[in-house]
Image (cartoon, rainbow, N blue to C red):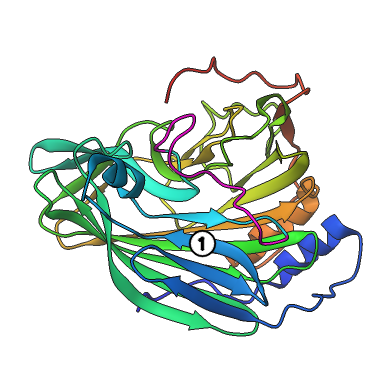
Amino acid sequence: MPNLSFRIASNAILLLLALMAGAGLAFGADSGFAFQDKPGQFLDVLLGDRIVARYMYAFDKSDPKRLHETYKPYLHVFDAEGKAPITKGPGGQFTHHRGIFVGWNQTGFDGKRYDLWHMPKSQQVHQKFLQQEAKADHATLTSLVFWNDSEGQPIIEEERTMIFRALPAPGIVAVDLATRLKAARGDVRLDGDPEHAGAQYRPANEVVAAETTYLFPKEKASPTKDRDYPWVGETYTLAGKRYSVVDLNHPENPKDTVFSAYRDYGRFGAFFKKDIKAGETLALKYRFLISAGELPDAAAIQKAWDEFAGVASPSPVPKTTVTGGANKGGKKPAAKAK
């Protein structure tokens, strides 16, 4: 089992969502977490009788279409009613963008580079579940994923752990992503660029591009130049409703991290470059706070980050920058195919 060095309990998350709701912490009729598996296809994470997330773990190379649909595992997040994903699957704009996902387009091994982002010749393949635990206030699953070369042999053995925690309305779910990347057969280099690598979140393809906005914890932020944001927030519109996501970056993650957070279609997340020596493991920790409605203010987000990071004293509330949508306070790079 992975040794998670951060706590599951999350009082600051509850505070954050309470501030968003402007109300108390009542959880409604949800009766706790459970799993529902469709063997070989996906694993649903249930809170009461509603789906909050769906881990897509199928791998099927029986024909090119199915291989394209299943060449990497990813996590869907569902709407507040548990009816439909608010994240993206195969197809649409940039088919390789899928839910909450992890990969590097320039994964170096044995003198070669493998594209484990677009997956033209290599795949990420779920092997088995190492853990499934569902309790009243949280659920945990760990998926063993092989990052394979073009011959189907693992370059990286990943233990991808996801911890789900109930949130009060308008919160949908908090997802802790704790992934451990082991260099299985030799030295590995994680390389690429912020548009094609890292741990990222992608809203559903039907997102209203003109209404996507980002929030940065810095005055006059420049996401293409700045490094090591503690968090970044996004709000997007889907089917006439607003949704918000905060991506918390743990301080133990590699330094010189860049956040790709400016595309109007909403794909955003953390990127860095890193060497992993043969037999060694790189541990990464992110927390995604996903809600219906607009983002909370910077003070509430900073409190949530303080709890996630385990800091001894409260951090100063940062000045912020909002970009995208109707806001002209920031300039995003010209869009191009990614």
Residue 274 visible, this angle: no
Which type of secondary structure does the marked residue at label 1 adopt?
strand
The image quarter in which residue 280 lies: bottom left
Residue at the (55%, 18%) spot, across then down: 333
- Dot 1 surroundings within 10 Å: few (below 14), some, or many (20 or more)? many
The image quarter in which residue 313 lies: bottom right
Where does the image place residue 98, in percent across and percent down from the top left?
46, 44
Along the horizontal axis of the image, is 83 left or right of 38? Answer: right
Q: Number of labelled discs?
A: 1
Q: Is residue 91 magenta?
A: yes
Question: Is 298 situated above or below 331?
Answer: below
Along the horizontal axis of the image, is 252 left or right of 52? Answer: left
In the rendered image, which residue does mark 1 sit on?
54
Q: Is residue 38 magenta?
A: no
Q: Main secondary structure of the magenta part?
A: loop
Toward the right, the furthest residue is 23
Question: Is 186 situated above or below 310?
Answer: above
The quadrant of the picture occupied by the N terminus is: bottom left
Relative depth, front residue between 264 and 247: 264
Could you tell me the amino acid type at mark 1? Arg
Along the horizontal axis of the image, is 301 left or right of 182? Answer: right
Residue at the (59%, 52%) spot, across then down: 85
Residue 97 visible, this angle: yes
- Tell me which segment is drawn in magenta: 81-96
Where does the image place residue 201, in percent across and percent down from the top left?
53, 45
Toward the top, the furthest residue is 334
Residue at the (91%, 65%) spot, across then down: 23
Where does the image place residue 76, in percent across and percent down from the top left?
52, 54
Where does the image place residue 331, in percent across and percent down from the top left?
65, 18
Residue at the (79%, 59%) spot, across then down: 170
The quadrant of the picture occupied by the C terminus is: top left
